[in-house]
Image (tube, grey):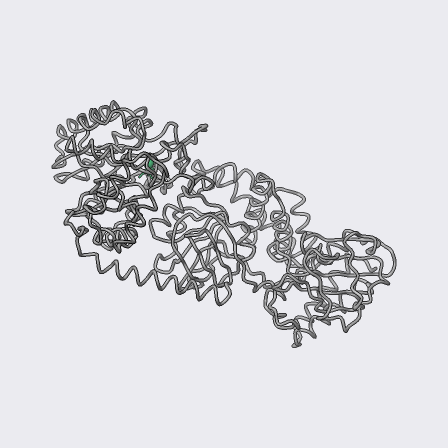
Amino acid sequence: MRSAVSGPRVLLKRLREVMAESLGAQERLDKIVTDIAANMVAEVCSVYVLRADNVLELFATEGLNPSAVHEASLRVGQGLVGTIASTARPLNLEEAQSHPAFAYLPETGEEIFNSFLGVPILRSGRSLGVLVVQNKSKRAYRDDEVEALETVAMVLAELIAAGELEGLNRQGTGLDLSRPVQLNGDSLTEGLGLGYVVLHEPRVVVTNLFNEDADVEIDALRSALKRLRISIDDLLERGDVATDGEHREVLEAYRMFANDRGWVRRMEEAIINGLTAEAAVEKVQSDNRARMMRQQDPYLRERLHDFDDLAYRLLRELVGKPHGPIAEEIPGDCIVVARNMGAAELLDYSSENLRGLVLEEGTPTSHVVIVARALGIPVVGQVGNIISQADIGNAIIVDGDDGIVHLRPAADVETAYAEKVRFRARRQAEFDELRELPARTIDDQDVELSINAGLAMDLPQLEQSGADGIGLFRTELQFMVASHFPRPGEQEELYREIIDTAGHRPVTFRTLDIGGDKVLPYGQAIYEENPALGWRAIRLSIDRPGLIRMQIRSLMKAAAGRNLRVMLPMVTEVREALVVRRIIDREVGILTKFGYQLPKTLKLGAMIEVPSLMWQLDELFAVVDFVSVGSNDLFQFVMASDRGNPRIASRFDPLSRAFLRLLHKIIQKAEEHDKPVTLCGEMAGRPLAAMALIGLGYRSLSMAPSSVGPVKAMVRALDVRKLSKVFLVELAKPAGDQTMREILADFADQHGIPC
Ligand code: PEP
Ligand code: MG
């Protein structure tokens, strides 16, 4: 074998010529294998390409039986070639036949060859095929020879990714790159979205693979690395490293990796072998991704992710590309695919074009998910390795209802989903027709339907849904999506905008429900064993009264001369509401003293979310002007069932007798005290549950804007007297079966109520 130091450079130069020639795809591939074999003094050089059916097909060979081309094939995981593809790792063997995975393919006539070197053809860490050289003599290939073959494999990866080899295979199956893939994740926001992939961090397309002068490229790499290191140091030195969502820890890891000798050496070796600086970064990044995809340990995976991010930054440094997708490249129906992203970054995409979001990470409480929910966009999270499988412009379906993503869907899947979307649009059109009609039952009972909101961007939905008001405004969302603590002026501005837009419709502002798991990006995270039961919401407000004072003052100023409703989250003891009452009284005094106009009326309410209030209802109603049942939290505390844990999500039913009896007691007590009650948890937005609530006596429900239509359709078809006759009698019976879902569903069916 010739020296690999000059060998690969000569070979890459030759391959560049082959790529530039006007040849058919098969002819080009044949020439490539001949050139590799000659350059590496190997008797055999073969290329196997991965098909959509997970089979590796021999596409070209020098040295094996030519009639085996497009005939010989191996499944992924089968034989040496299949093992290389499945592990995305090279195999370097002195005596191939003695390897346990060796599989003999008689049509290739390969038994006479002993030594074997195979490398995966990788793109973004994914195996697209395998490149093999073989020799008759027994020998181990040197490290630099392995490195050289990997570099050449990269050229083949680009050829495959460019679609040049599509259609060459005899079987009529497409190549793996175009294969439909179904990926399962977590449903973070409901809904369906059909569109095309936009990678939030688009791959930098390396068009120039072969270098003219290695020294020039090494200089380019070194100076890009220098700029990168300086930019990381700058970020670290800036006091507010959290501004970009980049926490100090991540930046420290970046700095460490940017100085990692092994990383730099591997990139420089690839340049010496003939690649341009950017192609070298991509090659090493791809190897790293392959390791990342195999890595099970979450900590190491995270570190490899950091490396990946860094390589991406370095590539952008080298090719001078700005961060993020280019506006002109964003298609009309865009589905953003990202590892994770900040809330503000999602807002950079036009909401008119945005059809969905897919995240490799992401949890229901991520800020970006909260914003997506406010925009009404379906989100699926925890979708492993989607970025390495998706390409810009690929067709994609986001099924936020079931937590499924279909990448490059087959025609029948696409048709089925398109039909689902049309069906939903038709139903939506029906609901739109109800917009101006009252939510009145057949027996003339009026039900107030309001929406839950939390950001200014929710406001248009108030009009569109035809809701009666905002029953729950979650003020913490402004704090959660901001990059800094919202100043009093900013709070006041938002509250004024909300009140102005709502006009005559009432708005109930809930004071900050932060702490526990709702950590502010600029705040200090405090570890708690059970955050849901921890130092959060009203508890935190009482201990840090400056916060709630500032918020109440902003609310009062924003509501000058108008009605103001303030509601407290997570009240556990009546005393807590009294403390806030005193804070309000003090603010009234201060504002009056300084000549500010006060709100026309100010009503104070409490959320019933903690079971302890069930035994203080008389005292509570004596202190507050209204209550709102936060059934999400109340249910989780009553049932001892974490609301965010998918394992137990469907284990207990909010329509169980136990929970419904408890809700019944609240409404009965409220009637006794003549105090208004709303229910603003998720169940209010589900027509069947909303029907049960109306049956219990609830006449005010607050829900996600998209639920107003379906719930109103249910209300308008309901006769409450008839329902109560069946339902309340059943509810009082000693419980046999806990859930009343079936009884309610049967009633709805029998009376033609859409639930
Ligand atoms: C609830 O707990 O039901 C509620 C409406 O509040 P949140 O979902 O914001 O905790
Ligand atoms: Mg709650």
Q: Image point 27% across, 25% down: which residue?
A: 615
Image-quadrant location for residue 272: bottom right
Q: Is residue 190 visible?
A: yes
Q: Image point 14% across, 47% down: which residue?
A: 504
Ligand 2: image quarter: top left
Task: Tell me: 696 left or right of 107.
Answer: left
Camera-side residue of 189 and 559 = 189
Task: Tell me: 271 left or right of 258.
Answer: right
Q: Is residue 460 visible?
A: no
Image-quadrant location for residue 84: bottom right
Percent x, y for residue 487? 29, 37
Query: How many marks overall?
Result: 0
Camera-side residue of 219 and 355 = 355
Task: Tell me: 259 left or right of 427.
Answer: right
Camera-side residue of 20 and 185 = 185
Camera-side residue of 101 and 294 = 101
Percent x, y for residue 113? 84, 61
Q: Image point 23% across, 40% down: which residue?
A: 696
Task: Tell me: 446 left or right of 645.
Answer: left
Is 312 located above or below residue 300 in the figure? below
Residue that protrudes farthest toward the top in the picture: 575
Percent x, y for residue 619? 21, 24
Percent x, y for residue 629? 27, 36
Q: Quadrant of the N terminus?
A: bottom right
